[in-house]
Amino acid sequence: MTYVITAAQPDDGATLGPLHLRNYTDPDAGIDESWIREHRGSSATAEGVAQWREFIEAANQHPAPRFCRVVRSGTELVGYLCGHWEESGTITLGPMYLLDEAQGHGLGGRMMTEFLTWAGPAHIRLGVVDCNERAIRFYRRHGFEIAGERYLWRGKLPTLPMTREAQTSAPADPADRPSVRR
C-alpha cells in the first residue's frame, strides 16, 4: 500500500470531520461512539465541515497560523496532524490520528517532523488520552513530557497534558512567524 503525506485541501474537510470521530474510543472509560458523537459530533456536521475548511485554508497561507497535513492512500484519507499558534505564542498540537492500517509505516514520525519544522523553536502543548500508551511513547520520542495531572476532558475522557519546551535556536525571521487570527 502506498501512502502520501500532503497539505490538506479545503475539500478534505468533509472527510476529516468523520475521521476525527474515530479517534477517541475508550470502552473502559465509557467512551463509546454515542458519547463521541455527543461531544465531538459537530465536527462531522455541515457547520463542522465548514470549520475544517476554514482551518485548512488558514493552514495553506504563508506564513501559516495553522498546520494541517493529511495522509492519503489512493483517494482515501487515513490520517492527519493539525496544530495552531495560540495568542500566547504557544502552539497547540492536535488533533493527530492515523487509522490502524496506516500505523507502523513511519507516517506519524514524518508528519511530526514536518509539524516541528513548521513550529520552529516554540513551546508546544497537547492532550493525549491517558490509556493510549502507544501515542504517549510516540510523543516522548519527539521531545514531549507529561506536564501535569491527568484531567477529564468533558468530564469523562481521561487526558494527560504533555508539552515540548521551547527549543533553543537562532530566532526565526519575524516575517515568517504566523500572525494569530480569530
Image (cartoon, rainbow, N blue to C red):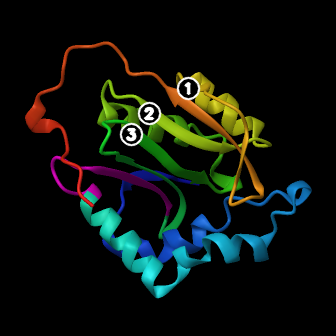
Q: Secondary structure at mark 3?
A: strand
Q: Quadrant location of residue 52?
A: bottom left
Task: Determine the CA span between mark 1 and mark 2.
Answer: 8 Å
The residue range painted magenta reads 59-73
Indicate the amino acid at tag 3: Ile
Q: Secondary structure at mark 1?
A: loop
Q: Residue 32 in the image: x percent, y percent?
A: 81, 68
Does residue 178 appear left or right of residue 10 in this picture?
left
Nearest the eye: 1 or 20: 20
First-in-chain label (1 vs 2): 2
Quarter of the image for the N terminus: give it: bottom right
Dots 1, 2 in contact, CB < 8 A: yes
Q: Which residue is mark 1?
A: 144
Quarter of the image for the C terminus: give it: bottom left
Q: Which residue is mark 3?
A: 91
Crowdedness near tag 3: few (<14), some (14–19) or many (≥20) residues, C-alpha within 10 Å: many
Task: Give the number of the disc on residue 124.
Answer: 2
Nearest the eye: 10 or 126: 126
